[in-house]
Image (cartoon, helix red, strand yellow):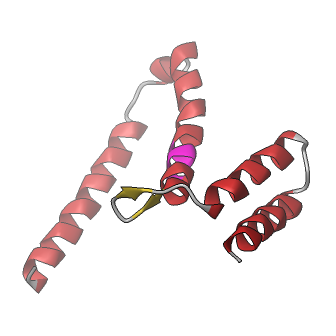
């Protein structure tokens, strides 16, 4: 990829992001006050974060992989359900994955 194509791509993506943000601000408030829209808006960040975690835990390159990272995630979810402090969750998950990799 040449430098010109890369810069045009970056500028195009930036303009596209700006227009998308502008379109979001142009939505009338009565649309945003609809209960279904509010519920979807509340759940989208959770779904995106869950998808990112799933990709990072269950894949290596283009392959589906089940390894120590999944055990760390299971420990983290368990501790979150027990309402453990976030630092404890992170350390316990990292320790679990590290110990299983030994």
Can residue 34 be seen in the rendering of this structure? no
Which residue is painted at 54% across and 31% down in the image? 41
Front residue of this view, candidates 98 and 56: 98
Which residue is painted at 40% across and 29% down in the image? 27
Front residue of this view, candidates 46 and 21: 46
Can residue 53 be seen in the rendering of this structure? yes
Q: Tell me the magenta residue range.
A: 48-52
Q: Position of residue 55 (x, y in %)?
A: 48, 54
Residue farthest to the front?
Answer: 102
Quadrant of the rendered image containing residue 22: top left
74 horizontally vs 53: left or right:
right
Q: Is residue 51 magenta?
A: yes
The image shows residue 46, relative to residue 38, as above or below, that is below
Q: Is residue 2 magenta?
A: no
The image shows residue 63, relative to residue 10, as above or below, that is above
Q: Position of residue 23 (x, y in %)?
A: 33, 39
Quadrant of the rendered image containing residue 93: bottom right
Front residue of this view, candidates 4 and 60: 60
């Amino acid at each position: 990829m040449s430098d010109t194509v890369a810069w045009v791509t970056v500028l195009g993506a930036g303009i596209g992001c700006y227009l998308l943000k502008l379109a979001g601000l142009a939505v009338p408030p009565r649309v945003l006050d609809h209960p279904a829209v509010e519920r979807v808006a509340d759940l989208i960040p959770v779904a995106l974060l869950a998808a990112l975690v799933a990709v990072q835990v269950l894949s290596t390159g283009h392959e589906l992989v089940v390894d120590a990272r999944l055990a760390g995630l299971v420990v983290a979810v368990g501790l979150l359900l027990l309402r453990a402090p976030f630092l404890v969750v992170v350390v316990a998950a990292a320790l679990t994955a590290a110990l299983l990799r030994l």
